[in-house]
Amino acid sequence: MSAAPSQPPATSRAEPPAHAAVNLWTTIGAGLREIWAHKFRSLLTMLGIILGVSSLVAMSALVKGMEKGAKEALVAIGGLEKVRVEPQNVPPEQLHLLDQAVGITMNDVYALEAGASLVTRVSPEMRVPATVSANGKRFRPFICNGVWPVALEMSEHVIAHGRMFNELDDEMARSVCVIGTATRDELWGAPEDVGREIIPLGETLYINGVPFTVIGMFPHYESEQDRKARELALAQAAAAGTQAGPARDRGRGRRGNFIFWLKNATIYMPLNTAWMKFRSGMSLAEPGRWGSPGTPATGVITADPRLSNLELKVASVDVLSDALQQIRNILMSTHKGIEDFNFRTQEDWAENINLFIRNARMSGGLIAAISLLVGGIGIMNIMLASISERVREIGIRKSVGATTGDIFVQILVESVVIAVLGGLVGLVTSFGLVQLIGGFSPTDNTPIITAPAMLLAFSFSVVVGILAGILPAVKAARLNPIQALRYE
Amino acid sequence: MALVELRGVSKIYHLGGEEIRALDNVSLDIEPGEFISIIGPSGSGKSTLMHILGCLDTPTRGTITLDGVMVQDASPRQLAAMRNRKIGFVFQFFNLLPKLNVVQNVELPMIYSGVSGRERREKAMAALEAVDLVNRAKHRPSQLSGGQQQRAAIARALVNSPRIVFADEPTGNLDSHTGEAILGLFRRLSTEGRTIVLVTHDPEIAAVTPRRIEIRDGRIAQHVDLTLAGLDRPPRPGFVAEPGTAAPPAS
């Protein structure tokens, strides 16, 4: 090794290159050309992303549909403002006051009406465990309650035929009742079965053997979905020229429509009627069963004045907790501090809905994310294969002046272009997928495709494309041009 | 000042514990407009020398100045810029991108120097005209003969007006007739003032250049310079200079 040669005088250090950014469009064009050159391979690679994006969108659409159905049901039972006051067992520490526990009575109703400013409506209910019969048939309605006329608004009922009983009917304890369509269907026949709608106004109905006159009927309650499906079936039946359509699913089997069936299987009678006909004198017949547990069975005729529960409507959801406190204070005073009552709000239910939605979204999202991840691995795999068969090309590009960065960007752009194309196709496919799912079960909640879900899925696919491209791009950019050129 | 100045350049590889000197203390000047050949058998280090001269590689020791820029410790990015602006390569296997047509291949260096699309096309067509290949501009490389492919590669090497062109065995993959034509093209370019370095193992091909450097075992074994003898062209291809300094006869 000779001595270090002297430095030539007039030399500058290597000049920093005025790096001209390679036009992005040129790079994207090159990427598209590369994908087009391997059409089938690229399509297979994209398939992972297509499936990932479309399943993500479809899953979110399904959950959205379920959410809408659940909210619909929530509104149908009276919304979030509804509070139910139910009797409960006296807590252990107050057991010595058991004989003073009065239960929920009309006293509470008057006190709440007078004192609870945040409560807009009070509806007492007296439950009558009942079997009804008429027309030679028997039926056990789900709800048979003695109520005030206000129960109509309380439980989101409307009168389709006839009238609701009024305060006068209540005052006089008249033997009148309002029924839902399920009762009519069971006793007189459903429109689908008899071919015409029977409106049994003025008919006599026996509740536990006591005759009542039907003075009103609710409409047939059903979810949007069921209504559409039924109308569709009806239209099809009409087109086919058949007289009777397919039998109506009364919804008992399906969880989401239970609420609507419950509303249809309702019988309301005036509160006083319920009390007079079914509660007064009960203790005579069965001492101790209806009276307070502590009361000695004396055999004296003591009518049971207790209500089965109260339904309250609060001014708005925002003041729910304040209202609950107010109700509690009033009831504590009327109950002499004995806590033999309990609140049930729809909030628990709403929370359950939200929890379910969140879980469904999480698990669905996880599955879709995994399939996107698999798609990303597919892209990475094919990009790695692609660069190892293009080592020479990379060497040539480097020899004519491509920088490490240029090669990195080129490979990354190719990967992202595959992912973006896959994402776009996936968005289109998701519509078809949702149609397909809707086709399987037309009566379930229709999936709703939302823009944010599409945006989210698409951005995920872009991110996956970037992440999947990084490793191959680094590998390609690091190739030594000399070895790459020698590569056969 | 010389276009290329190599001073005490060594390239040392370590294979296992063993030290391999691919280049050992090489000093060399190349003047602008020179037509020079680097000759040597395979494994002599001529390829390593060309890689260092062509900014594809950096020396382990020594300095190299190319067009006034010291490149021995330049970053990969600076080397890429040098390759892009100041250097053109012509390879034995043409090294055209098979998926691009001829004119797109010629445009390739300009893509990396950020030339706009229209200007790229104009310059590429001009370069193709210089190698008489305009009528094949839209063909794929696979549709061309070897000589045409090599001419396309030469057009690509020239398109960015480099200061120096390296041709690594440019006739190695061509029949002798086509090889002649390519050498003729280089000679013509040389008369137009281009600086051209021909790398070959074949003394007959090296004989077309007035100046020849023979590399053996990483060192300059012989340096023939006919320009010093007042001849700026050898009388005929295969001419061997004065006895004593002549390259060994072709094997």
Image (spheres, helix red, strand yellow):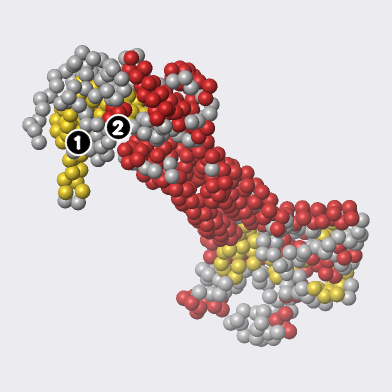
- Asked if residue B28 shows in the view, the reply is no
Disc 1 target residue:
B216
Q: Quarter of the image holding residue A343? A: bottom right
Q: Name the one closer to the observer, B169 or A375.
A: B169
Q: At 41% from the left edge and 32% from the top edge, which residue is drawn?
A: B174
Disc 2, disc 1: CB below 8 Å?
no
Q: Residue A40 placed where, x, y %?
A: 57, 46
Q: Is residue B22 above or below residue A248?
A: above
Quadrant (top left, top right, bottom left, bottom right) of the N terminus of chain A: top left
Q: Residue A104 placed where, x, y %?
A: 62, 69
Mark 2 belongs to which amino acid?
Answer: Asp
Q: At 54% from the left edge and 45% from the top edge, which residue is drawn?
A: A42
Q: At 36% from the left edge and 17% from the top edge, which residue is drawn?
A: B188
Disc 2 target residue:
B202
Q: Name the one closer to the observer, B34 or A268.
A: B34
Q: Chain of mark 1?
A: B
For label 1, the SS is strand
Mark 1 belongs to which amino acid?
Answer: Arg
* Left-right relation of A178 to B176: right
* Left-right relation of B41 to A291: left
Q: At 66% from the left edge and 49% from the top edge, which residue is drawn?
A: A432
Mark 2, other Cα within 10 Å: few <14 / some 14–19 / many ≥20: some
Q: Name the one closer to the observer, A477 or B132.
A: B132
